[in-house]
Amino acid sequence: MIEKIFEKIAAWAAQEDAIRAVIIEGSRGRNDNRVDRFSDYDLNLYVTDVAKFTQRDDWIEQFAPIWAMEKETDPEGEFSRLVLFEGGYDIDFKLIPSSRLQTLIKGQTLPDDYQRGYKVVLDKDGVTARLPQPGYKAAPKKKPGEAEFLYAVNVFWFELYHLVKNLHRQELWHAKIRDACIKRRLLQMIEWHAQASHHWDYDTWVAGKYMQSWVAPDIWQAFFQIYPHFDQEDSWRAACALMPLYHRLAGETAQRLGYTYPYEMDKAISEYILANSPV
């Protein structure tokens, strides 16, 4: 059970002097009712010596046999060890300088992930009580400026044109890479559309999580048509289904933001693509 591994980690952290605090974020930190047997533990370890835990990984091996591990460093210089233990138990460790807690206390600010809720597991110095209380909701999203919006639209259509070129050449693998970029741009527009339709603190989560709960039902149904098989003909079908969906989402979003959508560019590229079927 993942709880048994967590208990081992908590007991170890209590004895490890370099670890000053442990905080759970994510679904288990906010007591989300969507927690299930696949839910991981997102553990933030506030430590006095980050290098002690990043220069070697044998400290992780004591908790359970490891199936796989991914190492990450985020833009703020925080190190993570994303660990899949034997049995399919997923625990993510983030290693953060303990001084960061004092920064949060002094500024009375919380990271975005903590705004949704967090749970203090360990606090050896008695400082976490001075952290701000979470609002139990996401931080408001930033409304895109017109230049940012138009750039996103341009990249979408640029990539879609190239995807169709790949299909003509039967470069199916490369077409999938293009399609991944297109879907990232589509997701960005889906989020903007939802927020522009409601308000800028409307919760669109991250990376499409729980999307069925925050997009309109008819938009959700349209998604079933835009993911193709590894196949030229089906990829072409999905591209044809994608164009009117993006046209609607981006056009409505531009209108709600008071921006001018480039309908002429949209029309020119759409017509060019449709006139040059690869199948």
Image (cartoon, grey):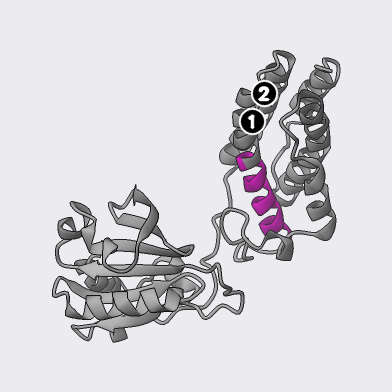
Element type where label 2 sits in the image: helix
Residue 15 is left or right of residue 36, and the answer is left
Q: Residues within 10 Å of mark 1 (few under 14, many from 20)?
A: some
Quadrant of the image occupied by residue 175: top right
Which residue is rendered at x = 28% and y = 62% of the image? 61
- On residue 197, which mark appears? none
Q: Is residue 74 visible?
A: no
Quadrant showing the C terminus: top right
Res. 106 in view: yes
Q: Position of residue 34 (x, y in %)?
A: 61, 74
> Compared to 146, does 80 lie above or below?
below
Name the side, left or right, on which 111 lies relative to 203.
left
Q: Is residue 115 magenta?
A: no
From the viewer's perspective, is 36 left or right of 18? right
Q: Amino acid at mark 1?
A: Lys
* Residue 173 place in picture, x, y as percent: 62, 25
* Residue contact between numbered discs 2 and 1, judged by CB atoms under 8 Å: yes
Tell me the magenta residue range: 184-197
Percent across and percent down for residue 227 are 74, 40
Q: Position of residue 237 (x, y in %)?
A: 83, 31
Main secondary structure of the magenta stretch: helix
For the point 57% across and 53% down, the residue is 207
Say how many tags the image has.
2
Q: Which mark is residue 176?
A: 1
Which secondary structure, mark 1? helix
Q: Please name the amino acid that badge 2 sits on.
A: Leu
Look at the image and say whether residue 195 sits in the magenta stretch: yes
- Residue 79: quadrant of the picture: bottom left
Classed neighbour count for the residue bearing mark 2: other residues with Cα under 10 Å, few (<14), some (14–19), many (≥20): some
The dot on residue 172 is 2
Above or below residue 262? Residue 202 is: below
Residue closest to the eye, 85 or 203: 85
